[in-house]
Image: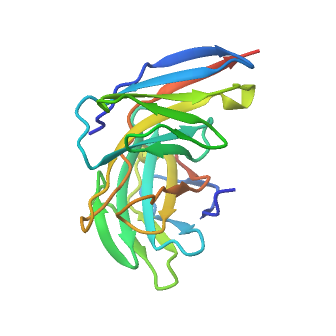
Amino acid sequence: DSGVTQTPKHLITATGQRVTLRCSPRSGDLSVYWYQQSLDQGLQFLIQYYNGEERAKGNILERFSAQQFPDLHSELNLSSLELGDSALYFCASSVAPTGMNTEAFFGQGTRLTVV
Amino acid sequence: DAKTTQPTSMDCAEGRAANLPCNHSTISGNEYVYWYRQIHSQGPQYIIHGLKNNETNEMASLIITEDRKSSTLILPHATLRDTAVYYCIVRPMNYGGATNKLIFGTGTLLAVQP
């Protein structure tokens, strides 16, 4: 158990819909990362937050957005869903966004299926 | 973009040492080598990291060549539960910089055979 909690574990929704994925980081971790893993793309970095502020952005679509709340949990919002958005979405957390020994710990992911 | 090269797949007999190579010939002085693994559809799991010295923990050993252009992850006694995709990642440690996000490549699928 990494200490990172993601909910829900599974999500099935229809095209065009909007969903919210939730992540609770490990106790004491201030930085949260979101990744998408689909069969043909591997693990793709989406976005990173640190203490409530966006820190880095990767291959995140405009239809997707994220935020980190004062209690440090984070939410990833996916809207206007397409079949190609079906994937595993992972959240990770670390103590800090930079510096030494800031290994990231991953949650067990949310499997999103768009039908 | 990933800055490492790994074999696509490897086999290892149960109980034997698994040696997973990684090439990172363009690594710079402020970059660490990290290893993660992902057991089927689970979240990636941190294994070990190092800068230039060899490192060992309860899971594995990391051997980094003197020129730091390649490294080897060693699982000393592989078990069936070690079957996973192993990712070698070069990660900058930018003091005062923006981020040290992990960029995953395609990794090595290690299949431990009974």
Closest to the observer, B52 or B60: B52
In the image, residue A23 lies at what x, y percent?
A: 55, 67
In which quarter of the view is residue B69 placed? Answer: top left
Q: Residue furthest bottom?
A: A70
The residue located at (26%, 28%) in the rendering is B25
Closest to the observer, B95 or A53: B95
In the image, residue B23 lies at what x, y percent?
A: 34, 26
In the image, residue B40 lies at what x, y percent?
A: 62, 35
In the image, residue B67 lies at what x, y percent?
A: 29, 30
State whether residue B43 is above or below residue B22. below
Closest to the observer, B18 or B112: B18
In the displayed structure image, the side of residue A54 where residue B114 appears, left or right: right
The residue located at (34%, 57%) in the rendering is B100
Instruction: Locate the N terminus of chain B and report the quarter of the image it occupies.
Output: top left
State whether residue A97 is above or below residue B112. below
State whether residue B32 is above or below residue A103. above
The residue located at (58%, 47%) in the rendering is B43
Colour pattern of the rendering: rainbow
In the displayed structure image, the side of residue A64 where residue B9 appears, left or right: right
In the displayed structure image, the side of residue A34 where residue A1 appears, left or right: right
Number of numbered discs: 0
Instruction: Locate the C terminus of chain B and report the quarter of the image it occupies.
Output: top right
Closest to the observer, A96 or B27: B27
State whether residue B13 is above or below residue A6. above
